[in-house]
Amino acid sequence: MARVAGVDLPNNKRIDVALQYVHGIGATTAKEILAKLNGAIKPETRVKEMTEHQVGLLSSLISKEYKVEGELRREVQQNIHRFVEIGCYKGVRHRRNLPVRGQRTKTNGRTRRGRRKTVGAGKSAAPAK
């Protein structure tokens, strides 16, 4: 089992698909990484067929040229924190736990907003004394 950027890649998958298990690497980036290795690793190679040398090449290229896993997650969190701090629209939406990217919230958005809270039908009016 090859380990790249702190992630164990699945053995039976092709390397171009297995690289996508690393946070921050998608299909396009995976193909780009393999192209930068100048044919040292072919995209149709299975992870279990890779040599230690190939794994080392892959790991060194990813660590030098790409932000992945913890470093990328940390940067995203810092950006969100900065938005909240400066009080921009995206920061306000994050602070209120509402959708950030312009989605409607009147009828949808339950994932972000949580369970429904019924308003006005909770308690009956208390009798006057």
Image: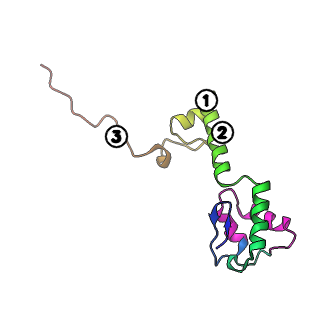
**Of callouts 1 and 3, the N-terminal one:** 1
Query: For the residues marked 1 and 2, what is the alpha-carbon distance in whole angstroms?
Result: 10 Å
Residue at 66%, 76% (x, y): give it: 13
52 inside magenta stretch: no
Task: Give the x, y percent position of residue 21.
Answer: 64, 64
* Residue position for label 1: 85
Q: Is residue 44 above or below residue 114?
A: below
The residue under label 3 is: 118
Direction from residue 98 to residue 120 in the image, left or right:
left
The disc label shown at residue 79, or none? 2
Q: Residue at x 60, y 34 (%)?
A: 91
Mark 1–mark 3 CB contact (< 8 Å):
no
N-terminal label among 1 and 2:
2
**Element marked by disc 1:** helix
Tell which of 119 and 42 is nearer to you: 42
Q: CA distance from mark 2 to mark 3?
A: 34 Å
Label 2: how many Cα within 10 Å (few below 14, some 14–19, many 20+): few
Quarter of the figure that contains the N terminus: bottom right
Q: Residues within 10 Å of mark 3 (few under 14, many from 20)?
A: few
Tell me which amino acid carries mark 2: Asn
- Residue 119 sits above or below residue 55 on the image: above
